[in-house]
């Protein structure tokens, strides 16, 4: 993680608000790990610094979860964040399996239905792959399509 990232997130209004008490996962689901939250924070900061507007985080809908929902001009961008310490088990982007893509598509459809804009919107699915301690960040725009 780059130094001062928490402060930069707070200035941009992207800092997470802590809930009091212990974190409890939904039944059958592990809680989000501190490393997972840190990866999402780093990805949100990375995308914001490149002009995207992060509008939602950790959205659960339609049987899936969306790590980040962002706006890029008139395009709604659904972002999957993957972080790996090293590539010994494959690259972070390779961890976005066909099953994960289907769940993300389902969640995106549900989010769009719950958040109608009244105008036609373009949609894009991106992956932010982080390897090591944020030493390498790959932003894969249009990583897959909605088919």
Image (cartoon, rainbow, N blue to C red):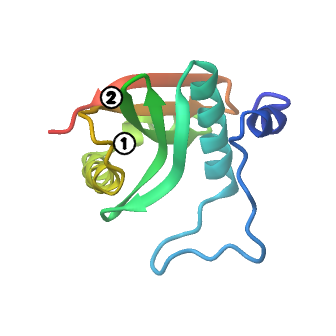
Q: CA distance from mark 2 to mark 1?
A: 10 Å
For label 1, the crowd category at 10 Å Cα-Cα, with few meaning under 14, some 14 to 19 and many 20 or more, is some
Q: Nearer the viewer, mark 2 or mark 1?
A: 2
Residue 142, percent from left and from top: 32, 25
- Residue 91 shows in the view: no
Residue 144, percent from left and from top: 27, 32
- Residue 79 shows in the view: yes
Circle 2/circle 1 CB separation < 8 Å? yes
Q: Which residue is mark 2?
A: 143
Under tag 1, what secondary structure?
Answer: loop
Residue 25, percent from left and from top: 56, 74
Residue 10, percent from left and from top: 78, 40
- Which residue is drawn at the image coordinates 38% and 23% (left, top)? 141
Q: Which residue is mark 1?
A: 96
Q: Quadrant of the C terminus?
A: top left
| Residue situated furthest front in the rendering | 118
109 above or below 95? below
Q: Quadrant of the N terminus?
A: top right
Question: In this figure, what is the number of numbered marks?
Answer: 2
- Which residue is drawn at the image coordinates 74% and 36% (left, top)? 9
Quick one: 67 or 2, which is closer to the camera?
A: 67
Under tag 2, what secondary structure?
Answer: strand
Q: Which mark is residue 49?
A: none
| Residue situated furthest top in the rendering | 50
- Which residue is drawn at the image coordinates 61% and 22% (left, top)? 136
Quadrant in the rendering for residue 107: bottom left
95 above or below 136? below
| Residue situated furthest left in the rendering | 147
Quadrant in the rendering for residue 143: top left
Residue 49 horizontal side relative to residue 139, left or right: right
């Amino acid at each position: 993680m780059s130094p001062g990232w928490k402060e930069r997130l707070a200035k941009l209004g992207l800092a997470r608000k802590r809930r009091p008490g212990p974190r409890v996962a939904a039944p059958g689901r592990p809680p989000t790990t501190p490393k997972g939250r840190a990866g999402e924070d780093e990805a949100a900061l990375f995308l914001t610094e490149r002009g995207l507007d992060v509008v939602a985080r950790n959205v659960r809908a339609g049987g899936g979860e969306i790590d980040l929902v962002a706006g890029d001009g008139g395009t709604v961008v659904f972002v999957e964040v993957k972080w790996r310490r090293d590539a010994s088990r494959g690259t972070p982007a390779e961890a976005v399996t066909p099953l994960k893509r289907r769940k993300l598509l389902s969640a995106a459809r549900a989010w769009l239905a719950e958040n109608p804009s009244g105008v036609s919107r373009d949609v894009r699915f991106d992956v932010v792959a982080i390897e090591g301690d944020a030493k390498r960040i790959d932003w894969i725009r249009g990583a897959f399509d909605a088919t």
